[in-house]
Image: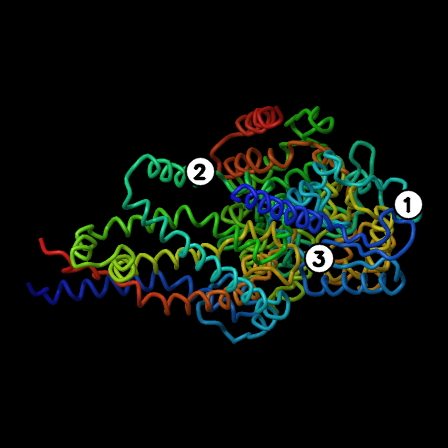
Amino acid sequence: MRTRPVVRVGQYLALAAYIVFLGFPLLWLVSASVKSSSELAALDMNVIPKSLNWGNYTEALQKQGLARSAVNSLIVSLLSMVLVVALSMPAAYALARFKGRLRTVGITWILVSQVFPVILIIIPLFLVLRQVALVDTLFGLVLVYTTFTMPFALWMLQGFVAAIPTDVEEAAAIDGATRFQTLRRIVFPLLMPGIVATAMFSFVAAWNEFFFALVLIQSPENYTLPVALKMFVGGEGKVALGPLAAGAVLATIPSLVIFSVLQRRLTGGLLTGSVKG
Amino acid sequence: MGTRRLAVGALAVAALTLAACSQGSATTGGGADAGGTGGSVTLKFQSLSDQPAAIAAVKDIVDSWNAAHPETKVEIVQAGWDGVYDKLVTQFNGNAAPDVIHYEAASIVPFARDGYLADLTSKIPAELKSDVDQGVWDSVTVDGKVVGVPTELQTYVVFANKKLIEAAGQQVPTGSSMTYDQFEALAKATTKSGQYGVSWGLKSPTATFMSLALASDGTYFEGTGKDAKITVGEGEMALPKLVKKMAYDDKSIDPVSLTQSGSQALASFYAGKAAMTVQGSYQAANMAKDAPAGVDWVELPPLAGSAGTKQAANPQTLSVNADSANVDRAAEFATYFADAENMATLNEADALIPASNKARATILSKTGGKDGWAMTMESAKGLTGAPFLTVDAYTQWKDTIATPNYQKYLANQIDDAGLQQALTDGFAQVNR
């Protein structure tokens, strides 16, 4: 059935409006990042700056060492992403496929683990990490992020596993595939969109996390981006708005690059036609 | 065989754990001199200075200390204001706090009560003691012990657009103070179509109301710690009532500004939409930099109520970690940091008011009182220790009770009696 032209135009208009709605904050951020402090303090809020002030970028990079913080964030986020995916994949498969009391316990644990506020956990966690000399280290942060992201990642991934019909695994078994071969050649490729989605979620969770990084990291050379960006917010209500906006723009770039690389693999429809019925 | 392997494994784990524990406990950086009596030590100084000029000033002070005191090296650990309370809670609980801690009077009280901050009473040099007003010392004194060296302060001041005041046929107030009646009259006189008399950013009104209430003898609290009692009477209600009257009866305060931050309210002042704005004194430095060329701004004399120009002194402070292996040397550094010359350099960079009178005089003579410094220093004369600074539940009351109820009051959702009851009952609730 063909879509009528009027409907098609309406769809495009709605899509354009949605893109503007989503893109406007980013546009505003970029605009603020090149405005002078006097222009930022003015009442008339123009999107297009009167003049381009690149000094905010220089200040952001020089004042808080944002490049170093970005590298730290990237290391922490990528490592915790890899760990979360690697650890949650087999667990998610087991959780989705093997019904039993252990599964109920596992699911309950996942849900309960989401209930505790981090402020409740931070002091015991700090003490434990201090005992093993992992306070103020990026590796300590990776362990913490992996631990705290895992439950939700597991929950997410087991949903993707459950969506793969068991028929395809049975068909592979009938064709003579071993369990490992079935997992590697059949389940893993079908699970790829779920793995990518989980990886993205883990990456973003670590990339944006502030509180653990604030408390566990002591040395400025180990600061992650959110902590470094918060340094632009001062006492007595002072905010260095221009450099903060410039820093935020710079902080968005690595995340966008990672997303653009991963999103191509986040395509649905891989299961289409895998099972007749 | 299995048992032996298990035993070897357990021993290996125990050895690794012990090794990790011994590494983990070396946090003070105290070096060879644990007692602070000799040898070289390194002190960690967690600084919250955020402005580029202030960061440079702090570095200069630390460099000059390190050059003069090779046996007591100070290392700056740069931190930010956001979330620093939680960070310190964790650091103190984990016995990993730095030796010297930069923070503010209102926030160090709980740490002092829990015994985390060293008593500096006997370590403050007589010269510094006498050069800082007693009201400021009171703000850093907990249970009779000085727990912080005061460094920088701010006051709430009124900035005016000279041209708009004169265009309304009014004279720009001069002298050493301006009464609230004068302020109200000036606001009325300068209010006209498309222009308000005042733009006042009261999005987070509690600190402003608590501080300025002292000028009307509104102290809110009596007693200290958990024994404190709250009273919300005439003195406490004087300013909120005035603001509400000006916003809704006189219509001389821009009502939108009551929902804005100080910086946001500054924008309408810059745009000539308001003749006056009430701001933190540090905004004078931003005005000098950012005010459009056509805005001829001036800082007015400090506001005076029935009790004069009193305001709460809530200074930024340098405290010493009581568990530091080098309390004496850390205290020596903190007092060096607060030396008049250092304080003047730092405060000029930060656009804040020095705690010591000598440093204030230095800035005044250096700046010639320009860019609002003359009136800012005048306003500093009324700084005094406020009872709320030593109330245990103050921070919780401020965030969960006072701020939302003041916001409701300013939005005209509750009346005077409603506000008084909410503040009083709320304190009883959080102070249980």
Is label 3 in a helix, a strand or a loop?
strand
Specify few, some or many for label 2: CA neighbours under 10 Å numbering under 14, 14-19, or 20 or more.
few
Kindly indicate the quadrant of the structure image that contains residue A274.
bottom left
Query: Residue A211: x, y in percent?
Result: 55, 49
Q: Position of residue A28 (x, y in %)?
A: 44, 65
Q: Is residue B59 left or right of residue B297?
A: right
- Identify the residue at image location x=23%, y=53%: A164
Check disc 1 and give the amino acid type: Ser
Would you say the residues marked 2 and 1 are in contact, meaning their CB atoms lie under 8 Å apart? no
Compared to B173, does B369 lie above or below?
Answer: below
Of B155 and B278, nearer the camera is B155
Residue lying at 69% horizontally and 26% vertically, measured from the top left = B226
Left or right position of B138 against A217: right
Q: Residues within 10 Å of mark 1 (few under 14, many from 20)?
A: few
Q: Which mark is residue B77?
A: 3
Q: Are marks 3 and 1 in contact (CB under 8 Å)?
A: no
Residue at mark 3 to residue at mark 1: CA–CA distance: 30 Å
Task: Report whether A82 appears left or right of B48.
Answer: left
Instruction: Give the camera-side residue of A126 and B296.
Output: A126
Rate crowding at label 3 as few (under 14), some (14 to 19) or many (20 or more) other CA atoms within 10 Å.
some
Q: Which residue is mark 2?
A: A115
| Chain letter of the residue carrying label 1 | B
Residue underneath mark 1: B130
Same chain for mark 3 and mark 1? The answer is: yes
Q: Position of residue B55 (x, y in %)?
A: 72, 62
